[in-house]
Image (spheres, grey):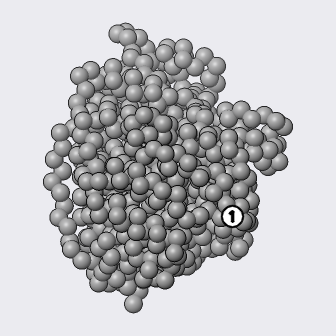
Amino acid sequence: MSSRDSILASIRRHTGVRHEMPELTLEAITYADKLATFSEVLAGAGGKAIELRPGEDVNEVIRREFPEAKRIASNLKEITCATFNPDELTDPRELNGTDVSVVEGSFGVVENAAVWLPRQVRYKGLYFISNALVILLDKTQLVHTMNEAYRRTASMDYDYGVFMSGPSKTADIEQALVFGAHGPIQVVVLLK
Amino acid sequence: MSTKHTIAAARFLKNKENEAWHDHTLWMVRTKRDKMSHSLPEWERLRELASEIKLYSNSHLDTLLEEFEKNAIANGAIVHWAKDAEEHNEIVLRILRQHEARNLIKSKSMLTEECHMNEFLMSKGIDVVESDLGERILQLMHLAPSHIVMPAIHIKREQISEMMEREMGTEKGNIDPTYLTHAARKNLREKFLHADVAMTGVNFAVASTGEIVVCTNEGNADMGTSFPKVHIATMGMEKIVPNLEALGVFTRLLARSGTGQPVTSYTSHYRRPPEGQEFHIIIVDNGRSDILAKPDHIRTLNCIRCGECMNTCPVYRRSGGYSYTYFIPGPIGINLGMLRNPEEYSDNVSACSLCLSCSNVCPVKIDLGEQIYRWRQDLDKIGKASKEKKVMSFGMKFLMERPGLFNTALKFAPVVNHLPRFMVYNGLNAWGKGRELPAFAKESFNDMWKKNKVR
Ligand code: SF4
């Protein structure tokens, strides 16, 4: 018997009572001011939310936030401050040394300030490798909770996707919080 | 446990300052968890749902795993099944050999600890690099994790600085956590870029879509899988959840319970391998299907490895992870150890004051303390009950059979003073040294709790 079949046989042999799947009814929390709470929770996770003012250009904001940045990666047409298109690289390792990456988020989750990023770039490493990540997000695209979030992603097709809440972090040295363990040290969500 | 662990544990526990820090720090994490749980009116409902979903999935593992496999294969993944640790390790080695891989970058996985995979692969000449910072620190110090979520919680920054100076050439005496973390970031970046194969654990496997979900704060799992041509994801079979809607219940509970964050920085969904990459998923039994036959202990399969039962446990906080003989410490580790091998791990069942704090906070409602109590009663059967343990079992039985009296009954605190000396390293009795629990003799735990004297 293959391991697969013997494992499945062992499961069948040992399973006793078969419990029912519960009805996933839940009165989940809702937030009165989604945008304000999202920004607040994001700050708590070490990120920064910036709401674009009317008439303001995203490139100006990115330049203002990261005046020192030399290598700016983006495959988005509107990001004219990008210095290269990461999708044109033949090896994702060439992404190393990127100062800022600019990507687009699909929607945000208010309860935990996570942004859903289904892969929309050639190499998903782009989301993790640069020192700073700027996520463009439509501010009308905010859901209250993860329950609602998964109802949305259920109808989406993606090969890889990540809910990202703020920068990479660790507290492995004496519980002292440090940003930028391996991924971005800074995350800015630009709300348009 | 190797001598190295023993020495380190003894060193840690000898130092009263470290011990107090450990206790205090973990209690802070527990406090953060409370803040998180209070911020959601539906918290208790989420716990209830999480527990019920797990009971459903663990009693339908056959059909759910088949569904998961079918969908994962349709997504382009290669699915393997491993009956035990040995088969798991062989599968990993076979994949590595197929790709002529010499090095493996991995993110944190309790399952690979369970299988002793690193030692096995290294004996076969594979360079295994842990990429979670805490795990990496321990790997370079040749130590084992002492907590399942905060693996290096028992190590002090001075020790890390010393090790990093030696291994990575950092400045002598620089103990700044930001400096050290960023030096490790630089060092590990090269490892990420040049690894042959990446390996991750699995927090959740979604049956209806065939995808796996990995949760990290560091982003090390995602960095690891971004460059090599092969990704191996390994999962205990109880990681299965039926669908995305059910997954939402768990991702809301996991980090809030474990570290007091609203969510981990990264909740990463791996569905299909990118072009040119191979994606392997290993489904591991290693004793799990046997637990299904033990109705009293079946709920241990609910565990989502959040670590909360360690943070809240007064014994764990004061004694540290190395005082347990099973590789997973704390309340869940006591139970899993007994399910693995009751003869070998029965000492751990004494490491419990039956305060039931673990049962009260566990996000998937495992009756951790109650199960420990049942194990104690079973000790006789496996010929492990010493006289001392019998005294305690009797005392605990007395308490447990009178739930109404439980609070006041804690005034029978002398029982606690008969705690067997479960933490003996090198003849140094750490519990006896640091923890005679004089407080218990004078005031009940709950009284002290109310007066804010106990954390
Ligand atoms: S037993 Fe419960 S509290 Fe402990 S690690 Fe598992 S899920 Fe968390």
Quadrant in the rendering for residue B4:
bottom right
Residue drawn at (60%, 16%) of the image: A67
Q: Is residue A11 above or below residue B28?
A: below
The residue indicated by pointer 1 is B425
Element marked by disc 1: strand
All told, the count of numbered labels is 1
Q: Is residue B324 above or below residue A192?
A: below
In this orientation, does residue A123 appear?
A: no
Q: Is residue B98 above or below residue A150?
A: below
In the displayed structure image, the side of residue A171 where residue B302 appears, left or right: left
Residue drawn at (25%, 70%) of the image: B60
Toward the bottom, the furthest residue is A1
User: Quarter of the image containing the N terminus of chain B?
Assistant: bottom right
Q: Amino acid at mark 1?
A: Tyr
Q: Nearer the viewer, residue B277 or A20?
A: A20
Q: Can you give x and y, in whole percent of width and height, for residue A191 in the image?
A: 37, 22
- Characterize the local packing of mark 1: few (<14), some (14-19) or many (20 or more) Cα atoms within 10 angstroms: some
Q: Can you give x and y, in whole percent of width and height, for residue B233 in the image?
A: 48, 62
Residue drawn at (26%, 45%) of the image: B44
Residue drawn at (59%, 52%) of the image: B436
In this orientation, does residue A32 appear?
A: yes
Q: Can you give x and y, in whole percent of width and height, for residue B123 in the image?
A: 71, 73
Q: Is residue A47 above or below residue A160?
A: above
Q: Can you give x and y, in whole percent of width and height, for residue B36 in the image?
A: 37, 36
